[in-house]
Image (spheres, rainbow, N blue to C red):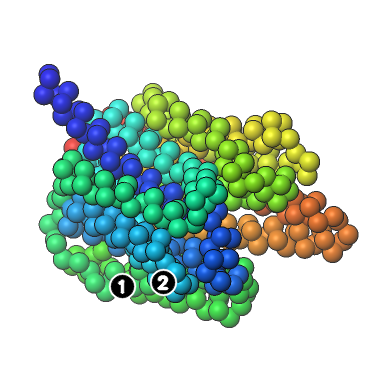
Amino acid sequence: MPMADKNDRRKWLAFAILSLGMLMIVLDVTIVNVALPSIKQDLGFGDASLAWVVNAYLLVFGGFLLLGGRLGDLFGYRKLFLIGIVIFTCASLACGLSNSQLFLVAARTIQGLGGSLVSAVGFSLVMTMFTKAEERAKAMGFFGFIAAGGGSIGVLLGGTLTSILNWHWIFFVNVPIGIAVIFLGRMLLPEGSSQSVHRHLDIYGAITITAALMLAIYSIINGNQAGWMSLQTVGLLAGAIVLVGLFIHIERHSHAPLMPMHIFGLRNLATANLVAVLWAAGMFSWFFLSALYLQLVLRYSPLQVGLAFLPANLIMAVFSVGLSAKLVMRFGIKTPLALGLLLAAFGLALFARAPVNGSLLLDVMPSMILLGVGAGMAFNPMLLAAMNDAKPHESGLASGMVNTSFMMGGALGLAVLASIAAFQTSSLLSSGVAAVSALNGGYHVAFLLGTILAAIAAVISFLALRVQFNPKNAAHDAH
């Protein structure tokens, strides 16, 4: 028994190191947003060029998720995770040392590649490390909290570091953390080698799907600026569709495909990916638009915005780390996922009526609490649904797919909802409505659409997930 206790302690310590690495990646997306005004002033960015500090990261991050997951299946999850952390840490140091626009954007591009590799294999390592259903549900719940709550922690940390020190430190802070994760990860993380018969990498498939994703992401993140019906946006999306078609053709004829076509027939995985797209669109509208509501309508400082998100983060943590796993073990994945998404939809609906002179206690906290409970309940079963049906040697691909779905859903949802909010604000301004009221009116429409998306995700998860799912089925050995 003492040996079992020692092994358990080692396993959970390894999981803590893995979680720290994943948190570093998730934080980086939003920690930068808070510091953008300081970066703009210091390095002389224009409005259009400043967007590339964020877009360069997102473009490469989203583009390489599927490839990163498959590389993990072929060559080992620990190896890919540590390579990703090394790339991310070195690029973070380069970002912090940047003294020109070009240098910073180039370093952010490399950072996106490192982040993509880490994210793509993170869930697979969890599946490898935890083979007992209860342990796996608990670990995936904590990972869900990192994915859902890490972004708002980034706002708080970014505001603090930028205010007390300067913007360079939002990148420097990654360096000692990354070094610790590399050093301890080499000692503690399991190799997680797959059982894949083929070690052959489908080069043509990898190139076409990565290019398709990068074209699609670029067209989405620039859609508002270029115009959704512009030649650029339509042409890039058409190019992405053509590349996806070419990718499917390549996969059908490859003897060792990057993405075996049968994976689309896995019902829980397909449902989880669709739910991820819809829920990410709703969640991104909550996170970014509520932050704008707090800053531009209620006139909160960046630090106050971060503190306003704190209750939702704490609730999310409690549900993700403890209660969500118990709910999954008791009720399976369907009921907690559908109920969590429904509660989140109610939280977004409350934001859709938040007034111009809103109160933190009456108009912000109820929404934050509902969204914290909903996200905390929903993430764990959504991730388990995505990973449960995949074969052990395809778990990296499944992980990459759900990450990609979440990323694409969030990027597309935010771009479209922000565009609709801006259009509504312009309409209200032209009809003589006061500026702040017009801004808030735009946010209301976006929150209402986010509510509908989250509600649709709840219905789909309840109707489409396999009824016979039992958490004990997840106890098969990931090796």
Examine the rendering and report whether any part of residue 396 can be seen. Answer: no
Position above or below: 96 against 308: below
List x then y, in percent, for residue 141. Answer: 38, 35
Taking depth in this image into account, of 404 and 342 the one nearest to the observer is 404
List x then y, in percent, for residue 422. Answer: 70, 61
The quadrant of the picture occupied by the N terminus is: top left
Contact check, label 2 and label 1, Cβ < 8 Å: no
Q: Residue furthest right?
A: 432
Task: Give the quarter of the image for residue 308.
Answer: top right
Position above or below: 404 against 330: below
Task: Give the quarter of the image for residue 451.
Answer: top right
Q: Amino acid at mark 1?
A: Ile
Report crowding for label 1: few under 14, some 14 to 19, many 20 or more residues within 10 A (C-alpha).
some
Q: Residue furthest top?
A: 1
Horizontal placement of 152 versus 385: left or right?
A: right
The residue tagged 1 is 207
The residue tagged 2 is 103
List x then y, in percent, for residue 396. Answer: 27, 52
Q: Secondary structure at mark 2?
A: helix
Q: Which mark is residue 186?
A: none
Task: Give me the C-alpha separation between circle 2 and circle 1.
Answer: 26 Å
Q: Amino acid at mark 2?
A: Phe
Q: Which of the two labelled residues, at mark 2 and mark 1, occupies the earlier sequence position? A: 2
Q: Secondary structure at mark 1?
A: helix
Position above or below: 42 against 386: below
**Which residue lies at the image location 20% right of the left edge and 67% below the top edge?**
201
Examine the rendering and report whether any part of residue 329 can be seen. Answer: yes
List x then y, in percent, for residue 48. Answer: 58, 72
Taking depth in this image into account, of 35 and 309 the one nearest to the observer is 35
Question: Between tags 2 and 1, which lies in front?
Answer: 2
